[in-house]
Image (cartoon, rainbow, N blue to C red):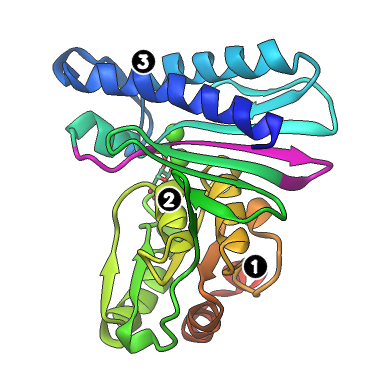
Amino acid sequence: MHPMLNIAVKAARRAGNIINRATRNLDIVAFKEKAANDFVSEVDREAEQAIIRTLRDAYPDHSILAEESGASGASDYQWVIDPLDGTTNFIHGFPQYAVAIALRHKGVVTQAVVYDPGRNDLFTSSRGRGAYLNDQRIRVSKRNQLKSSLIGTGFPFRQLEHLDVYLAILRDMMKGAAGVRRAGSAALDLAYVAAGKLDGFWEFGLSPWDMAAGALLITEAGGLVGDLAGENNYLKTGNIIAGNPKIFVELLRAITPHLSPALQRG
Ligand code: IPD
Ligand code: CA
Ligand code: CA
């Protein structure tokens, strides 16, 4: 395993232990609403600090972009961290959430970990070396038609201005696909696309820490990831489409006609 990936795995497992310990007594976990329907708990913060400490011990010069504590440092290497992706699920004891850690080198994601602590599922990838679930190589699914595909998504609950466009797409997807799932952890949804458990995924308004790790898993598993123009700017625009190569194209074809001018830019 690449040494930097090894450190990222160590950090993700530490965060996972903190999360698992907290699930034994969810009633005492304190949380607050950052914005409407957007929660942060003390577990998010504790997990994030454990990750940052682990990364800093190994690589004191690297910079950090973490969901709860923001950006720090200046380096060609930047760790992009979501300590707990799926906080709303976590708070409710709905077992679908993950730790996501990615490393960017000069802007290019080179290492990725998505760790589901409840199932002890560890998704990892180093650029150019494939993607893995635990010790098994994973690949995107081979399904080539939308009508037989299971598609993941997330609701635009922060950008309600996109709701009508989103609902029109959802309507088409419910009619056109075998099934649509909103599981509540974008990082884990993307890891599921990499592992072929979902055939495709789309969501608007995500942050880099939701997407960076999962996107590398998908491309290393043979899939495609893009923004709404099918280009590579999803970490900037926050809008993402992903899938096996055939379903990626199908999703793009299904979504494009609905886009508002604001979303057409990618
Ligand atoms: C959220 C989850 C969710 C997605 C939201 C994200 P958080 O992350 O990934 O699936 O729909 O947009 O913000 O806030 O739980 O880390
Ligand atoms: Ca997140
Ligand atoms: Ca989070």
Name the quadrant where ligand 3 sits: top left
Query: Residue 98: image x %, image y %?
Result: 39, 38
Residue 30 shows in this picture: yes
Counting residues from the start of the chain, the first of labels 2 and 3 encountered is 3
Element marked by disc 3: helix
CA gap, disc 2 to disc 3?
21 Å
Give the magenta part as a residue range: 94-109
Location of mark 2 (residue): 186
Location of residue 154 by image quarter: bottom left
Q: Which mark is residue 42?
A: 3
Name the quadrant of the N terminus: top right
Mark 2 CB within 8 Å of ligand 1: yes
Q: Is residue 118 left or right of residue 135?
A: left
- Which amino acid type is shown beneath numbered disc 3? Glu
Q: Nearer the viewer, mark 1 or mark 3?
A: 3
- Does the stretch in magenta take in 95? yes
Q: Residue at x 44, y 43 (%)?
A: 134
* Amino acid beneath label 1: Gly
Q: Do residues under tags 1 and 2 come within 8 Å of each other at their CB atoms?
A: no
Q: Quadrant of residue 73?
A: top right
- Give coordinates of residue 166: x percent, y percent: 40, 69
Q: Residue at x 37, y 66 (%)?
A: 198
At horizontal 62% and vertical 62% (from top left) the residue drawn is: 219
Q: Taking 252 as reference, is 96 left or right? A: left
Callout 3: CB less than 8 Å from ligand 3: no
Which of the two discs, 1 and 2, labels the residue nearer the N terminus? 2
Q: Nearer the viewer, mark 1 or mark 2?
A: 2
Mark-to-mark CA distance, 1 and 2: 18 Å
Residue 41 seen by the camera? no
Q: Main secondary structure of the magenta part?
A: strand
Which amino acid, by three-letter code, is at mark 2?
Ala
Is 141 above or below relative to 72?
A: below
